[in-house]
Image (cartoon, rainbow, N blue to C red):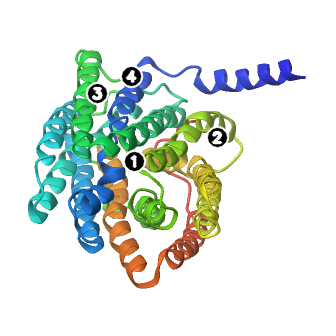
Amino acid sequence: MQIPLISWVARQYRAAFEGLSQEAWVLATVMFVNRAGTMVLPFLGLYLREGLGYSLADTGWIMAFYGVGSMVGALSGGALSDRFGSYRVQQFALFTGSFLFLGLSFLTEFWSLAFGVFILTSVADMVRPANSSAVFEYAKEGNVTRAFSLNRMAINLGFSVGPAAAGIIAAWSYQGLFWADAATCAAAGLLFVGFFRKRRPRRERERSATPGRSPYRDRGALAFSALVLLFALAFFQLVSTMPLYYRDVFNLREEQIGLLLGFNGLLIVAVEMVFVNWAHNRIAPRHAIAIGVLVMALSFASLNWATGLPGLYASMLVLSVSEILAMPFMISWITLRAGDQSRGRYLGLYAATYALGHILAPLLGTRVIEHFGYSTLYYGVAALSVLTAIGFSQLPPATGRQSQP
């Protein structure tokens, strides 16, 4: 009985990864290396509060500058990708971001920190829409959603490694987090340039005198972005208030927090590709997204029911299921809706919407905690998730160039 089961599982994993282009694998590897250095963000709140002695309110403001810069980077990265190509934008963002991480490690005064965080993320986060645009350009016909899912898997694998390693480094020195982030940015840049310097996209963008339709005049894209923002307000409690919750309520150490955050990434890596390969012909994207966001409501509500570390891991498990259901189909929806001449701008809007969530999530989250406590915050986030799920269920299908996942 065990042998047939193992054989069946092996076939599912093989089918999930078959047929993906070499370029898709390398783009995913670049993002893995880059996100394996995700060490500053998960511990930025603790660094500001415990390393530099900032108040909870000031910590929230500096983390909001992180979000503002991320939004600027996403919008500019998307627009520049449409104009100059995704290769140049990724090259610039990865190498320049490496130097900026080093510079940020020397800043301690409030406004210099806020400005430094803003500049860093304005540059480093240009890579996200540019990389997503490249994933589409190099994906084989029929493999678009799986190529994006592979990319997300790599990001989450990196995110499972990064915070876990960051917890160990932070226990020794918060300063070391910035140097590690800088090193992985540079390593990702070297890998990217070494492989793609002389390669041409599988899908050459059609040249046109017209710039293509604007996402800001596309009502469907704007409605989708509004719902993504509501989703992001809830989801980004993961990296803004939840580490504080783990410390304040459960008195977890940095290493424990890092492992708990890394658990999310490992679950995504283990399950998402197989799920996407199974689901794309069985579940309409908007329904998968809606179910995933609804599951997220349960995850945040369950934080208030946890009585120890097992309960926190159970809540993280539910949040991971939500992410697996919702997020692969979100980026596929917005990519397929865009045309060749405006894909970077559509992806830039998508990434910028998440960045706006980075701005608002810590600001709103920390304010609610200060005035009403963690319990009110997480029940409120659960209620918001239910309303957002209803909105996603009413979305129209993407109407850009269609491609099977």
Q: Secondary structure at mark 3?
A: helix
Looking at the rendered structure, the kind of residue marked 1 is Ala
Among numbered discs 2 and 4, the one appearing first in the sequence: 4
Mark 2 lies on residue:
280
The reply, left or right, for residue 324 in relation to residue 66 is right
How far apart are the alpha carbons under marks 1 and 3?
28 Å
Q: In this view of the protein, can residue 346 be seen by the observer?
A: no
Mark 4 lies on residue:
26
Of the residues tagged 4 and 3, which is closer to the observer? 3
Mark 3 lies on residue:
188
Q: Residue at x 9, y 59 (%)?
A: 112
Q: Tag 2: Cα neighbours inside 10 Å, few (<14), some, or many (≥20)?
A: some
The reply, left or right, for residue 313 in relation to residue 362 is right
Residue 335: image x %, image y %?
43, 45
Of the residues tagged 1 and 3, which is closer to the observer? 3
Among numbered discs 4 and 1, the one appearing first in the sequence: 4
Residue 300: image x %, image y %?
57, 65
Considering depth in this image, is 145 or 220 the residue closer to the camera?
145
Of the residues tagged 3 and 2, which is closer to the observer? 3
Among numbered discs 3 and 2, the one appearing first in the sequence: 3
Looking at the rendered structure, the kind of residue marked 3 is Ala
How far apart are the alpha carbons under marks 2 and 1?
20 Å
The reply, left or right, for residue 34 in relation to residue 51 is right
Mark 1 lies on residue:
338
Residue 268: image x %, image y %?
56, 40
Q: Tag 3: Cα neighbours inside 10 Å, few (<14), some, or many (≥20)?
A: many
Q: Secondary structure at mark 2?
A: loop
Say which quadrant the N terminus sits in: top right
Q: In this view of the protein, can residue 331 be seen by the observer?
A: yes
